[in-house]
Image: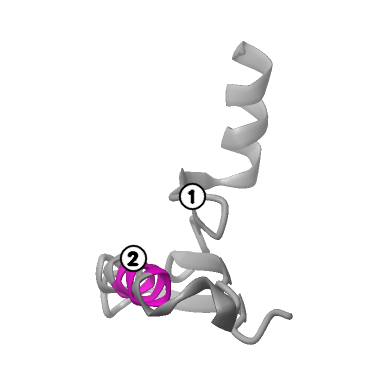
Amino acid sequence: MEQDSLYQEKLNILEWETVNDRLCSIKIRGKFRNLTIISAYAPTEDRGEEENLEFYSKLERICSRVPKYEMLIILEDLMPK
């Protein structure tokens, strides 16, 4: 576990969060500003409106926690088959 901590320190990872099997985020310390990258895999259309609303609600909640002065990148597959 100590080795994982050292590896994380070298990469300047400030935060890592796995929300569920469709959403995760990582915050990286940058030279001038921090960078948050969100990986999002939207549910298919056949999953139902309730699951889609829950997914986008969680995605919005994650995005809203990123301060305006930090960079935000969202990598998403919004129309999976």
The answer to whether the residue labelled 2 contacts the one labelled 1, judged by CB atoms less than 8 Å apart, is yes
Q: Give the range drawn in magenta.
A: 51-60
Label at residue 58: 2
Q: Under tag 2, what secondary structure?
A: helix
- Mark 2 Cα-neighbour bin, 10 Å: few <14, some 14–19, many ≥20: some
* Amino acid, disc 1: Asn
Q: Under tag 1, what secondary structure?
A: loop
Specify which label sits upstream in the sequence, 2 or 1: 1
Measuring 60% from the left and 35% from the top, which residue is drawn there?
8
Q: Give residue 76's quadrant in the image.
A: bottom right
Q: How far across and how far down the image is residue 1, in percent?
A: 61, 13
Measuring 34% from the left and 68% from the top, which residue is drawn there?
54
- Mark 1 Cα-neighbour bin, 10 Å: few <14, some 14–19, many ≥20: few
Q: Which of 32 and 43 is in front in this view?
A: 43
Q: Which of 9 and 43 is in front in this view?
A: 43
The answer to whether residue 57 is magenta is: yes
Q: How far across and how far down the image is residue 58, in percent?
A: 34, 65
Q: How far across and how far down the image is residue 61, in percent?
A: 27, 68
| As drawn, 80 above or below 13 | below
Measuring 69% from the left and 80% from the top, which residue is drawn there?
80
On the rendered structure, is 73 left or right of 80?
left
Measure the alpha-carbon separation of dots 2 and 1.
10 Å
Q: Give residue 78's quadrant in the image.
A: bottom right
Q: How far across and how far down the image is residue 41, in percent?
A: 60, 70
Q: Which residue lies furthest to the bottom in this view?
A: 79
Predominant SS along the magenta part: helix
Q: Mark 1 points at which residue?
A: 20
| As drawn, 45 above or below 22 | below
* Amino acid, disc 2: Lys
Q: Give residue 81's quadrant in the image.
A: bottom right
